[in-house]
Every structure is written in C-alpha cells, then in structure tokens.
C-alpha cells in the first residue's frame, strides 16, 4: 500500500494516544502562568514551549490571519533584542526554534541543550510583553505570509478545497475561517491590528509553559519564577474566564461543495458530520468516536472502509475516516473516498454511504477491536521515546480546554470503551442529515488527460 | 507501503556544550556473519531496527523503470501464507510497525517492536523480506496506487521542478528519471519484473543494520540471522558515477499556478572529500542555516519574496551536488532568482566572515548531539553511517572536524565548489519578466 495517498489529502492520522508517559508535574505561578514539566533524563536536551490560549478562532471578524501574522512578528525586535536576534541566539547555542498557530492556540518552541533553559526563558519572557513593532518590518513580513499562503494553500487544490469545506461546515463559528487568513484580509492587516492582538492575548495568565526533557520540576520552577514571575497578570483576562465564541445554530440543511481545479489528479469525495469534542471530565463520547475512526479507517488493510472498498470491491484507491477530538469547540467527523479512475464521485459517495449503512447493521469484528485496544496499550510504551511529541500533545490539550488529569485519564478511558459504546456513537453521528458533502474534481471539460507541461529553455 | 518525502529540506537539531554525543555504539557480527551497530538502551521495553539495502531505486532494469518502487510497496501486501489483510492483522496484533521506503540510493526498512513479542515480530518481518508473494490481486491494487501517484506528481510544481532538473543534469543515468517510473513503464511491469527487482535489491551483503533499544548483543546476533540470513548475495553492481551535463542558466516549464516552484543547483562535493567540512560549513552559512542563512535573510527577511528558501549538499552516491529550492509568486520570482545569483557570486568570491564561521560552528556542534534522541532516530543514524561507509569514530570526531574549519579553508573551497556561472535554475510556473536561457 502506498501511504502517500493518504498524506496527499493533508490528513495525517492523529496519534491514538499521545499522552501519559514520563513524569509529569504541574504548578501555577502567582501571575497565573500555568507550568507543566515532563521529565526525560536520557539525554541532556530540553524542549521549551510557550503556548498562548489565542488562535485564529479568537480573531475579530474581518482580521483573519492576525493570530498567525503576529506569530511571525514575534521573531522581530523587543526592547532588549534586535530583530532576528531571538533565533540567532538560539542557533548560536546549538538550538532550533520555531512557532505555529492553530484555531485554538499559538505556540513558540525551542529545542536546545538542557543547560540553556534559563536563556530560553529570559528571551521568551522578554517577547511576551516587550515586542517592538516596526512599520517597515510589518510591511515586509506581510509579503512573507502572503507567499506562505500562496505556497501552502493557493498552490494546493486539496488545501483550497479544505478551506471551502470548513467555511461550509461552520455556519457561524470561526472555525470556518482559514488560520492563515483570507488573502484579501491578510493584505490589509496593519501594525495596529498586530499590536491590538498582542495586547489582548500575550500575558502570563493567558499562557501555558511546557518544559520537556532533562530538567527537574524544582529547577524549572526556580527558573520560571526568575524569568516569568515578574510579569504581571492581566486583570482583563481574569475577568474573561472562558473564551466566548459564536456557536453553531442547528444545522437544518444539507450542503454540498463542488470545487473544480484542473490541477486535481485524483478526485475524491468528503462527507462531514459535526461531532462533539473532548471536554474536561467528559471524554467518553470522544473516546468512542476516536475508536470509531480507527475501526472504519485506521488501518489501510483491516479497517472497514479500506477492507470493503479497496480490497474486496476494488472500487477505491483510498478511503479514510477522521475525527479530531482535541478542539476547544465543536469538531467534525469526516469520511473520505477517492475512487478508482473508472468510478464517478457520485458512485463513490453512494459506495461509502452504503458501507456505513452495512457497518451500522453488522457491527464491529471483536478481533479487530481487540487489536486496536492492544495498539493503544502499546502506544503508551512507544510514546515514552518521544518526549517532544508529548510536550506538543499536552500543549494542544491544555489550550483546548482539557487538564493534565484529562490527558492522563485518556488512555484508560479509551481502554474502557466497549464495542457497544462505539456503535452507539456511530449511530448518533451517522443519523445526522444536515451534512456537508464535498467533491474535489477536475473541470468536466478537461477530459482525463493532464495538460502536458511545456518546456522551454 | 511507500512513504516518500525526502530530503531537500534537511533539518538539524540542536546541542551546545558537550561537544560530543554521548552514545556508546557496539559493533556486532552475528554468528552467520551479518554486521550491525547497536546502541543498547533498556529504559523502554521496545526496539528499533533500520535496514538500509544499498542500490535502491537505481537498481532498476532500464526497461522496467519503477519495478523496485512497485516491489517495495508490495512487501507488506502478502508474504508466506498470508495475504495483505492477514499480514496487516498480524502486524496490528503485535503492535509492531514496519515502514518500507525507497530512495535513489537505498531501500530502507524501519521497524519497531515490543520486547514482549519480539520473536513473533521478527518472524513476521522476515516473511515480508524473504517470502513476499506478489499475488496478482495485490500487484494490480498497488499498481493502481502508483499510477495515481504518478498522475498526481504530473500536476505538482515542486515535483515537476526537481524531475526536470534531474533529467537535464543526469540524462540516461538512473538519477535522470523518476524512480516511481512512468504511466507507461508501470503499466507494462510484469510479476517477473517484480521478482527480479526483489532479487536485486534485498541482498544480505549490501545491507547496513542499525539497532537501538532494549536488546543485548547476545540476543541481537541470532535475531539478525533469523531476519536476514536467508537472503541471497548480490547479483549486480550499483550504478557508477553520473556524468553531470548541465550549463548555467534558466529553464522555464510553463505551468498554470500562481506561485512558481524553483529548483536550482550545480555539481557538489563528496562526503569523503578532504574539503567536505569546509563545504559543509559554507553551505550552512549560505542556505542551510534556518532563519539566519544568507539566502533566508536576503530573499525572505529583507525582501519578502518567499516563505522559505534553503540549500543543501546533495550527497547521493552517484552524483554529489550543491542544490536549493524555494517558491515565489510569479511576479516576484525573477527578483528572487537575481538575489540568489548575487549571493552565489558573492560567497564564491569572498567566502564567509569570521563571525559567520563562528556562528555556524556553534550551531552545528551544538545541534549534533541533540539528533540522537529516541531509538528510531538512533537506529536510522547508525544504519545511514554504515551505508555511507563512515567510520565508527565519526560521531566522536565530527564536531572536532567542524571546529577545525577556518575562514581560509572556506574561501579556498568556495572558489572550487561554488560556481555562479554553472548555476542552473528550473522554474515551474508562469514567471513574469524572466527569460529562459542556457
């Protein structure tokens, strides 16, 4: 089987567990900074991550992309550092650094020798409050994010399709906006927009510090008190309590998204259902949906959809089922079917829905379910080997409304989930009628042959 | 299953002080004569094994291009008395994982297995290596997957750019064509082609073995004999050096996309060349050094012409190269190329500064030890080193070699390595104001 087919859709399967392991300690500084320490003393390295509870879904309407734009600008000057000095200092100490933005969070991270942890904290604390924005740099960096959009989104029919799908799935919630922003709004983002965003969100009581690797909780606490402790909490964030966002009205109409692009090589259909996310103290339904996605599409050979549509009936090139439970607000459950070239997308849609109907009648093979549960058990062992991955899993969870206790309980909740639980969750999800179905395809007129690329020298 | 990616954008990780990595490598020879490098770490009850079979996709019979690629995708699609589903169910039941990857120089198998069921996992992997069945139904299924991937690549500007460059540079050498094959060559492959490709690629005298995790040397020897002992010896040589026939200039491939993909390069330097380390440092300063490299600073940070640009020393066995890549909107790409050309000329003539040298050395020596994090990564590094004939003490001496580089060394090597007049760009898109030339 060729794994790239799945990856080409931009849908990497989520890790099943991504949890526990390592000694995990948490504490909170007086200014509200939440600190999590994950110990791994096998090598003298450290991962230092600062996560802000601020992402693209927290943006003001009309300013899409500002969360990600500020993420870029955070590498510019502060009162103590010249523009670019943050990264060059990390590099000069043998480390690497970067950052990423999602709908629910923005995170900055470095990986470096463990004895440089204090230096990382000193610089990260500096840019939490003392960023200096410059008009010329804002103008140049705006070009960079537009190039980034051109590379990641506009050059990829699949990415453009996903963007259109999301905006159809969410009628009201800002998850319908692209993280990188709509191009016409990105072009208008100003220094003032960046400053407003920074002032509203970049405070210790809106952040989570994760340190993973060769450091003890006592060492981390002492350094965090020294570098982050002096930064005052922002009372406005205290008052905010929860992140209020527009929520979804009842979905009463089925919607269809047809995106045609001549660059599409392998057309596919995507069927999307709204689904509950993991919530603190209430993860059972999400666990059942996680296992449902695994039962339907987790293995390219033994899961229900690949087994039936790729191996048995030989109607599909690729099939998948996706559920992302770590979200602050309502998430989605998605089915994908990429048919063989001799089948239409209408047939592909009918094929996968027929498989779902059959699955709801026939249920889950107990042997398959047992294998999945054993893999979940084994994942607890394998993930101990990847402490940077654990740091990321905790950061994502804690900025999505979960607690350390929720994260640690997750493997046990998965293990306690039964076949009956999964089938009950399946019946509920697939009973939805107001779904969003998308077709990614070539223009009808474009026959099946690619336009031959023309070479000139 | 074939995972593909690769490699242009090589990332390094980090460390600082202890200038040397603290891992202890044991050299093992099994009772049956198979050699391996082992880093034993009993702290987590699992094992990672990397097997690098030299030759990879370049072993293809020219009349059966893509056979090794298709064969690699079939190794987990039925073996011994198991069909694809039964094999997958067995893998899942043990919570083991096998990845089968194919590159131009190596066929790479990466496995992880729990200590508690290691013998069963080894027996299963052995079946995939030694007794793949290449059943008709599986061949047709994976052939369909490969054809769809080739279709997809034909509309991917990055792939078109690198493929066009390779075709121009290497001609009839295996590097000059795509190891995935073409729609026609894949359609024509027979089961005999796959059996022949398997016979050529999976041979016990050309496999580099790296192991890390929960196992003793005494346990590892017999494991290797079980896993690999019944493979045959090689029956053909690996391809020789590729003659690189490429003049400086710009090749434009017209393709309807808002942003042009650019792939550029010229000949490079081999890993065993006495001047390798100065070249390595030079490349770090020019284009490999993340945000602080000259190209990132000039093309992205100062002018906003791209989201990312990098260069690398291509160390493929048959053709050492110095290469790079980036994407720029059609209206900006001509300016971006002019900036790259100017930087190329500057470093060729002037080399690098003391400050740049020092920053690169601090980064490279600090980052190196941080690579050795995790059993899977260590197993891969150990296999790669053997595959490249690097000595066991390379890890211990590597940082000293980096630190020994001087500004004068870099200037001398720059004059030989960096060739502005030979730098060739392939641009895929609809670039504005850019003349194709030779």
Image (spheres, grey):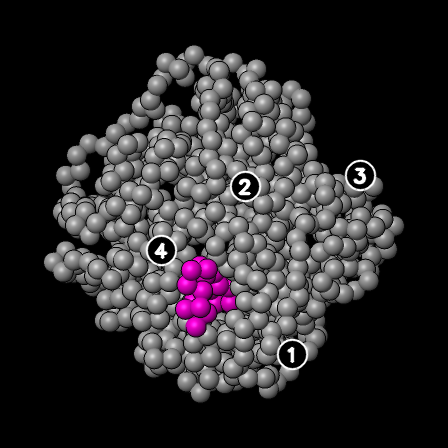
- Point out the stretch of residues depicted in magenta: B98-123
C-alpha separation, residue under disc 3 versus residue under disc 2? 35 Å
Q: Which residue is mark 2?
A: A40
Q: Which residue is mark 1?
A: B239
- Picture quadrant where residue B217 is located: bottom right
Of residue B122 and residue A19, the one placed in the foreground of this image is B122
The residue tagged with tag 1: helix, strand or loop? loop
Residue B116 is one of the magenta-drawn residues: yes
Residue drawn at the location 48% of the way across and 27% of the way down: A35
Disc 1 and disc 3 in contact, CB within 8 angstroms: no
The subunit carrying tag 1 is B
The subunit carrying tag 3 is B
Disc 4 and disc 3 in contact, CB within 8 angstroms: no
- Across and down, in percent, residue A362 comes to 14, 60
Would you place residue B211 above or below residue A189 in this image?
A: below
Q: Which residue is mark 3?
A: B355
């Amino acid at each position: 089987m060729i794994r790239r087919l799945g990856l080409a859709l931009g849908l990497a399967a989520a890790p099943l567990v991504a949890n526990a392991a390592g000694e995990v300690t948490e504490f909170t500084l007086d200014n509200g900074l939440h600190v999590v320490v994950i110990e791994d003393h096998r090598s003298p390295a450290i991962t230092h991550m600062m996560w802000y509870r601020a992402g693209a879904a927290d943006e003001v309407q009309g300013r899409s992309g500002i969360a990600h734009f500020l993420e870029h600008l955070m590498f510019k000057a502060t009162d103590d550092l010249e523009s670019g000095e943050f990264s060059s200092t990390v590099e000069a100490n043998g480390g690497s650094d970067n950052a990423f933005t999602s709908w629910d969070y923005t995170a900055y991270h470095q990986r470096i020798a463990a004895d440089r942890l204090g230096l990382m904290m000193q610089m990260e604390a500096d840019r939490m409050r003392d960023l200096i924005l410059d008009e010329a740099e804002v103008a140049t960096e705006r070009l960079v994010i537009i190039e980034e959009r051109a590379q990641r989104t506009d050059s990829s029919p699949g990415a453009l399709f996903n963007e259109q799908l999301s905006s159809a799935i969410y009628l009201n919630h800002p998850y319908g906006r692209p993280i990188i922003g709509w191009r016409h709004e990105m072009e208008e983002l100003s220094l003032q927009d960046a400053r407003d965003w920074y002032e509203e969100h970049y405070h210790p009581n809106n952040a989570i510090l994760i340190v993973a690797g060769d450091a003890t909780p006592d060492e981390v606490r002492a350094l965090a008190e020294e570098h982050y402790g002096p930064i005052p909490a922002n009372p406005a964030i205290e008052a905010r309590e929860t992140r209020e966002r527009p929520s979804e009205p009842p979905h009463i109409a089925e919607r269809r998204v047809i995106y045609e692009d001549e660059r599409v090589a392998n057309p596919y259909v995507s069927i999307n259902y709204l689904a509950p996310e993991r919530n603190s103290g209430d993860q059972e339904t999400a666990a059942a949906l996680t296992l449902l996605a695994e039962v339907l599409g987790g293995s390219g050979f033994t899961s229900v959809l690949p087994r039936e549509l790729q191996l048995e009936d030989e109607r599909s090139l690729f099939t998948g089922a996706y559920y992302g439970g770590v979200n602050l607000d309502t998430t989605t459950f998605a089915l994908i079917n990429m048919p063989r070239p001799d089948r239409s997308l209408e047939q592909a849609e009918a094929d996968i829905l027929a498989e779902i109907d059959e699955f709801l009648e026939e249920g889950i093979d107990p042997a398959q379910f047992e294998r999945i549960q054993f893999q979940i058990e084994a994942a607890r062992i394998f993930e101990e080997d990847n402490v940077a991955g654990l740091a990321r899993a905790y950061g994502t969870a804690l900025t999505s409304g979960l607690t350390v206790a929720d994260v640690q309980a997750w493997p046990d909740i998965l293990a306690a989930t039964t076949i009956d639980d999964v089938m009950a969750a399946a019946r509920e999800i697939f009973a939805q009628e107001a779904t969003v179905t998308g077709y990614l395809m070539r223009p009808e007129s474009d026959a099946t042959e690619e336009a031959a690329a023309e070479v000139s020298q | 299953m074939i995972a593909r990616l690769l490699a242009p954008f090589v990332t390094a990780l980090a460390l600082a002080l202890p200038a040397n990595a603290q891992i202890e490598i044991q050299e093992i020879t099994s009772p049956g004569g198979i050699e391996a490098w082992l880093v034993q770490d009993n702290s987590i009850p699992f094992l990672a094994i990397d097997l690098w079979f030299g030759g990879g996709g370049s072993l293809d019979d020219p009349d059966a291009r893509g056979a090794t690629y298709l064969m690699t995708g079939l190794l987990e699609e039925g073996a011994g008395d198991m069909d694809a589903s039964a094999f997958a169910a067995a893998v899942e039941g043990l919570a083991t994982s096998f990845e089968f990857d194919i590159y131009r120089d190596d066929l790479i198998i990466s496995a992880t297995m729990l200590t508690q069921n290691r013998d069963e996992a080894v027996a299963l992997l052995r079946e995939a290596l030694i007794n793949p069945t290449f059943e008709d139904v599986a061949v047709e299924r994976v052939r369909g997957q490969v054809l769809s991937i080739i279709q997809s690549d034909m509309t991917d500007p990055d792939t078109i750019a690198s493929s066009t460059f390779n075709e121009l540079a290497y001609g009839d050498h295996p590097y000059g064509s795509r190891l995935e094959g073409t729609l026609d060559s894949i359609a024509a492959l027979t089961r005999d082609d796959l059996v022949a490709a398997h016979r050529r690629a999976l041979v016990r005298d050309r496999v580099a073995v790296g192991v890390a995790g929960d196992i003793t040397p005494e346990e590892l020897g017999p494991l290797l004999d079980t896993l690999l002992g019944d493979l045959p010896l090689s029956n053909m040589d690996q391809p020789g050096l590729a003659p690189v026939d490429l003049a400086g200039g710009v090749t434009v491939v017209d393709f309807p996309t808002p942003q042009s993909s650019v792939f550029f390069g010229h000949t490079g330097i081999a890993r065993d060349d006495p001047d390798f380390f100065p070249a390595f440092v030079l490349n770090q300063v020019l284009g490999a050094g993340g945000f602080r490299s000259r190209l990132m600073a000039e093309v992205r940070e100062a002018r906003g012409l791209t989201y990312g640009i990098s260069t690398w020393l291509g160390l493929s066995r048959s053709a050492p190269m110095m290469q790079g890549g980036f994407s720029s909107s059609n209206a900006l790409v001509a300016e971006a190329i002019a900036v790259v050309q100017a930087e190329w000329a500057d470093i060729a003539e002037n080399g690098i500064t003391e400050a740049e040298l020092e920053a690169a050395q601090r980064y490279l020596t600090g980052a190196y030890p941080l690579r050795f994090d995790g059993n899977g990564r260590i197993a891969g590094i150990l296999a790669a080193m053997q595959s490249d004939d690097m000595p066991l003490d390379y890890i211990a001496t590597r940082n000293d070699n980096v630190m020994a580089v001087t500004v004068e060394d870099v200037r001398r090597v720059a004059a030989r390595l960096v060739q502005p007049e030979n730098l060739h760009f392939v641009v895929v898109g609809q670039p504005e104001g850019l003349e194709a030339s030779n």
